[in-house]
Image (cartoon, rainbow, N blue to C red):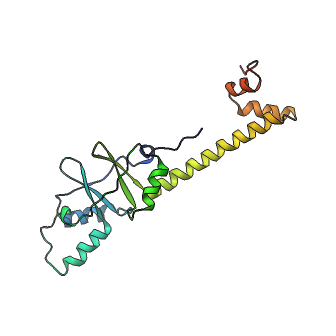
Amino acid sequence: MNPVPLVRQVMQESVDSISADLDAFEALDALVDKKLGFGGSPVVDANGALVGFLTMKDCLRLQVISHQHNMTGRTVRDMMSSIKITLSPDSDILSAATVFLDCDFLLLPVIERSKLVGCVTRRDLVVAIQKWYNARGHDFKHVKDRQELVDHPTSIARLQALVGISSNAQLASVLGGRHTRE
């Protein structure tokens, strides 16, 4: 009827990632310039493989500690958070939402064949699930209305409504295959 959408249908494919070998303060500047509202950026190695996640908390830690200690020469690799949770593009959005319920990240990377192919935010999933639920409810309403009209065809107007919301195959099944719309 209305299958659960997949992560690949709702993920953001153009992902801004940060190199693990980038200077930590350059990475901080990049995050500030991009105004990343989802809490950070995926970190990739020279081959494009995901190796971590640079969170806003990591950036705050760098800023606070840099006032107490000499932090020059640090790279993103030195300060990034490890990430053990990723999503597959072929996971459904309800499974992905369940993963988010058990982690603190606002964004999760989507990995396919060991490569970063996209990201999904909590908001992406909330919007997608709501749209799916609304479409699913709309489908259920049509099925219920159609069945009510089939079970109790009390007037010409109701029969016309049935014809209007039914496909040829559905009409054929109701009419025993004798008549369909042209």
Residue 42 or residue 25, whichever sits in front? 42
Quarter that holds the C terminus: top right
Residue 86 or residue 59, whichever sits in front? 86
Name the residue rendered at 71%, 31% in the picture: 166
Q: Is residue 68 above or below residue 116?
A: below
Residue 155 in picture, x, y percent from top left: 87, 34
Name the residue rendered at 27%, 54% in the picture: 17
Name the residue rendered at 73%, 19% in the picture: 177
Quarter that holds the N terminus: top right
Number of on-image labels: 0
Q: Is residue 131 above or below residue 171?
A: below
Q: Is residue 3 above or below residue 130?
A: above
Residue 45 in picture, x, y percent from top left: 20, 52
Residue 76 lies in quadrant: bottom left
On screen, residue 89 versus residue 153, left or right, reads left
Residue 153 in picture, x, y percent from top left: 84, 34
On screen, residue 93 versus residue 105, left or right, reads right
Residue 53 in picture, x, y percent from top left: 28, 60
